Structures are given as structure tokens and as C-alpha cells.
Image (cartoon, grey):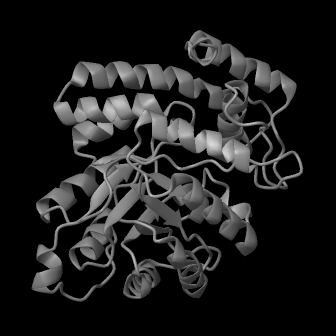
């Protein structure tokens, strides 16, 4: 549980920055998986079906090259191929957030420059990682990125991967100063998330706040979240869209019912045995999508293993119990 809020020193906000409302994306913005062929290349036909799956469900946007998209495993050429394919398939139908995730500030800036030509609705960046950094360095990192960004900058809070938790007070200060437009919170820290929402509200809501904690999106909406970025939304985007619309209408019975149904589906990530990290979570999502006929393989990026037959069968059992296989056969 995170209870310490270490806010880095920051210059005072200008009146214009303090008064500017966030124009960032709200609603359901799933982190798009990257379908691969058995040889590990980008599977464009599967990607077309997956994007159609999202668009047919009514998602509000897509987050491309995030953790669920296996961005950490891709070289620059592969990142460019993914962005070329996705932007071509989407064709402007929904806004795209683009992950520019890399170890240190100059490398993230290079990723931003490479992605500019795809006209993103925003760039998504984590704190620096690999080299040890503290609050001052994290502050300098985001301020440098914000000054260089040609589109709104989002902070991606994912301590399981970057080994540092972004402090709520610091994020709100960055939002107040006009450095970042939003936060994608994948910390799994619900106490910190609620504090972030409360601090943001008290500051006049300079940030758009989306949760990536897909099994407690209902609680995030009750706290005041603006939407979600659920990895499980690749499998069932329509459920998250229904939940968002119900939350916006104040229909909390429907919100709870949808979350309970999605939590039952999330059991797929607990079926792999002997797998860890992305191979377990993203591997389960890919396997479910393969079993639903949306993508062709459950291939993971090297050196990750694809799920074994026993794990696949357990995932199929969950899909059957939640009615997803029956829906796919119609």
C-alpha cells in the first residue's frame, strides 16, 4: 500500500496553465495487443480483425504500443510497422494514444519524434527506468518530454515494470503546470488512485485519469475516474464500453453487473501454470482471442513462451463458463 507522497520541486504554474482544461481522451481506451505470426512477425490480418473487434464494440480510442502490446520487446523497426498498420486500419475512426516507452529521456524523445507522423492524440511515457532515479529526476524527465511533445503527454504509472511509483501530488502538479494531460494508472494501488482523483478534483481537474486495473474499474468510476485502459478489454471490449456508459448515466447496478462478469472472465490470467509476467497475462489474452477466432496465434515475443496446451484448455473452460465461446459461435 502506498501512503507516502513525495512531490518533486516544481516551478509555480502560470495562470494560463492552471486554468487550461484537459482536452485528453476519456472513456474506454484498450491497450491494443500485437498479434504475431508463428515466426514472430506482425500478423496484419489478425490485427485487422482485432481492431474491428474493438471498433464494433464502440471503444473511445486505442492505446498502441503499451505493455499489453509488448512494446518492450520491439525494436524501432517493429514499432514503426505496428504504427503503420494500426493507423492504416483505424483510418481516423478513433483517436490513438501511442506508447513512447524507453529507458531514459533522450530515448523517449527519439520515440516521440518517430511517432509524430502518425498524428497521435497523445504520447504515453513512463518514468525513466534502468538507471536509478528519484523525484527530481522524474520531474525533469516529464518536463523535458512535455516541452518536446507535439501532442498531449500522458504519464504511465506502472511500478511493476519501472520499479518506481508516481506520486499523486507530483502528477497533479505536472497537470496543473500543463506538462501532462492525463494519467494511465496501472499501479494496482487503489489507495493511491483514489488520492490522485481527489487531488486532481481539488486542483480543478487538470488531468484526465484512466485506470488500467481492469477488475476494479467499477470502484475507479465511483472514485471519479474518467475511463479505463483495460488489457482484458481486448477480449471483451463491449463489456467495458457498457460499463462506462452505465457509469456516466449513474446506473450503478449495471456497472456492478458488468464488472462482476468481467472479473469472472479475468480468471483466464490465472490458468497458466509455470508462466510469469507478460507470458501469463498477455499470453492469456492472446490465447482467448485465438480461441474466439479473432487472431490466428497466441505467439509471444521472444524470449517469452506461448502458453501450453494444458493452459489453453483451462482458458477455454473459463471462456465456456462465461458464455464467450457460445457468443463467438453465433
Which residue appears at 66% of the width and 42% of the height? Answer: 282
| Of the pair 284 and 201, the residue shown nearer to us | 284
Rendered position, 56 above or below 190: above
| Of the pair 131 and 201, the residue shown nearer to us | 201
| Of the pair 239 and 185, the residue shown nearer to us | 239
Relative to 161, is 143 on the left or the right?
left
Residue 81 visible here:
yes
Residue 277 visible here:
no
Residue 243: % across, % down: 33, 30
Quarter-of-image position of residue 86: bottom right
Which residue appears at 46% of the width and 61% of the height? Answer: 97
Residue 82: % across, % down: 66, 61
Quarter-of-image position of residue 71: bottom right
Residue 226: % across, % down: 28, 48
From this viewpoint, which residue is outermost toward the right?
39
Q: Give the quadrant of the C terminus.
A: top right
Which residue appears at 18% of the width and 61% of the height? Answer: 205
Rendered position, 57 above or below 316: below
Tell how many labels: 0
Which residue appears at 14% of the width and 77% of the height? Answer: 18
Amino acid at each position: 500500500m502506498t501512503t507516502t507522497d513525495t512531490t518533486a520541486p516544481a516551478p509555480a504554474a502560470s495562470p494560463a496553465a492552471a486554468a487550461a482544461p484537459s482536452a485528453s481522451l476519456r472513456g474506454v481506451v484498450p491497450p491494443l495487443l500485437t498479434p504475431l505470426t508463428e515466426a514472430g512477425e506482425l500478423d496484419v490480418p489478425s490485427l485487422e480483425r482485432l481492431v474491428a473487434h474493438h471498433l464494433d464494440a464502440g471503444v473511445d480510442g486505442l492505446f498502441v504500443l503499451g505493455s499489453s502490446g509488448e512494446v518492450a520487446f520491439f525494436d524501432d523497426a517493429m514499432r514503426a510497422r505496428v504504427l503503420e498498420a494500426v493507423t492504416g486500419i483505424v483510418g481516423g475512426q478513433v483517436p490513438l494514444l501511442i506508447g513512447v516507452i524507453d529507458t531514459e529521456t533522450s530515448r523517449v524523445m527519439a520515440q516521440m519524434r518517430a511517432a509524430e507522423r502518425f498524428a497521435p492524440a497523445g504520447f504515453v511515457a513512463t518514468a525513466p527506468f534502468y538507471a536509478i532515479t528519484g523525484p527530481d529526476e522524474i520531474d525533469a524527465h516529464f518536463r523535458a518530454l512535455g516541452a518536446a511533445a507535439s501532442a498531449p503527454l500522458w504519464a504511465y504509472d506502472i511500478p511493476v515494470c519501472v520499479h518506481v511509483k508516481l506520486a499523486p501530488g507530483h502528477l497533479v502538479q505536472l497537470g496543473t503546470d500543463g506538462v501532462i494531460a492525463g494519467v494511465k494508472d496501472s499501479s494496482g494501488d487503489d489507495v493511491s488512485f483514489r488520492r490522485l482523483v481527489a487531488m486532481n478534483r481539488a486542483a480543478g481537474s487538470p488531468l484526465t485519469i484512466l485506470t488500467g486495473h481492469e477488475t476494479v474499474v467499477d470502484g475507479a468510476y465511483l472514485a471519479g475516474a474518467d475511463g479505463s485502459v483495460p488489457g482484458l478489454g481486448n477480449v471483451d471490449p463491449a463489456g467495458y464500453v457498457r460499463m462506462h456508459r452505465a457509469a456516466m448515466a449513474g446506473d450503478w447496478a449495471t456497472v456492478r453487473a458488468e464488472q462482476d462478469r468481467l472479473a469472472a472472465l479475468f480468471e483466464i490470467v490465472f490458468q497458466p501454470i509455470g508462466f510469469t509476467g507478460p507470458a501469463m497475462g498477455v499470453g492469456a489474452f492472446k490465447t482467448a482471442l485465438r480461441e474466439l477466432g479473432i487472431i490466428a496465434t497466441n505467439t509471444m515475443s521472444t524470449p517469452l513462451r506461448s502458453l501450453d496446451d494444458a493452459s489453453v484448455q483451462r482458458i477455454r473452460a473459463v471462456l465456456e463458463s462465461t458464455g464467450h465461446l457460445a457468443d463467438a459461435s453465433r
